[in-house]
Amino acid sequence: MDTNACEKTLGVTFISKDLLRTAFTHRSYLNENRKLKLEHNERLEFLGDAVLELIVTEFLFAKYPTKPEGELTAFRSALVNANILSDLAMKLGMNNFLLLSRGEAKDTGRARQYILANTFEAVVGAIFLDQGYVETQKFIERVLLPATDEIVEQKHWLDSKSHFQEKAQEIANITPSYKTLGEIGPDHDKKFTVGVFLGSEKVAEGEGQSKQDAEQKAAEAGLKSKNWN
């Protein structure tokens, strides 16, 4: 791992290069390289998750002094969810420095997204241990918090189902319903197709590996179909 290149990408110079390496070391890499005296990043991920949540909570508490707890919690969840963090990790080039097993390195789908999100949290934990709270706060303020205004204004803090229901009740005075339209594949790898309906009108369909995921995709497609984004 090229720690100098990684530091330039992150915009952080580490005192302990070992902490930086650990943040990017996936458990699977050590399973294939047992002789290496490295730690995997799960403990740093655990720490970083807590530090990240505190920094974002403190920021939102100060930024929105009149918002109730429920909305602040939803804003925070939208900022630190796995999709946002994995996208951010990609933009920061973290994917180029991951230490993975050969099998994990080939997988670029959903599993990689979770690995990237977890790595971002591990990096936050590493910065906290290496640089302290204030420097970690500066990092989060630089790379993550600028997305806050868009998330709040565009209501990205509402999940697609909640957003679609809110719009359907507001505009059409109807509570949407969801129906499973089909399922294919073996039990361990099923794919569901779900439709979202306003009364008898099928607005859109969505596919997913669970009914819940398919419902979210259907709601997301419904928002686009109705131009309710």
Image (cartoon, helix red, strand yellow):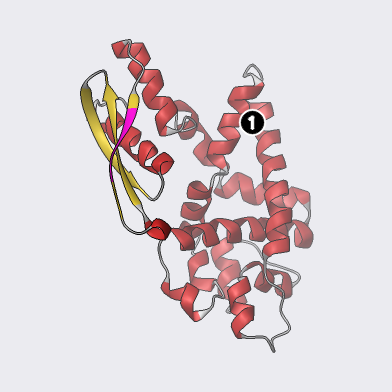
Residue 25 visible in this rendered orientation of the protein: no
Residue name at image x 23 percent, y 28 percent: 203
Task: Name the image quarter holding the N terminus.
Answer: bottom right
Task: Name the image quarter holding the C terminus.
Answer: top left
Residue name at image x 63 percent, y 72 percent: 27
Locate residue 202 relative to residue 30 in the image: left or right: left
Residue 90 at x, y percent in the picture: 46, 59
Residue name at image x 55 percent, y 56 percent: 117
Secondary structure under tag 1 reads: helix
Residue farthest left in this picture: 201
Task: Report the residue marked by disc 1.
Answer: 60
Give the magenta range.
178-182
Residue farthest bottom in this picture: 35
Residue 45 at x, y percent in the picture: 67, 58
10 Å crowding of disc 1: few (<14), some (14-19), many (20+):
some
Residue type (three-letter) at the residue carrying disc 1: Leu
Residue 76 at x, y percent in the picture: 60, 35
Check if residue 45 falls in the magenta segment: no
Residue 112 visible in this rendered orientation of the protein: yes
Residue farthest top in this picture: 173
Secondary structure, magenta segment, majority class: strand
Locate residue 168 relative to residue 23 in the image: left or right: left
Can you tell which quarter of the image residue 153 is in?
A: top left
The one of 159 and 183 positioned closer to us in this rendering: 183
Locate residue 57 relative to residue 103 in the image: left or right: right
The one of 60 and 192 positioned closer to us in this rendering: 192
Residue 222 at x, y percent in the picture: 28, 31
Locate residue 53 relative to residue 5 in the image: left or right: right
Residue name at image x 58 percent, y 62 percent: 10
Can you tell which quarter of the image residue 196 is in?
A: top left
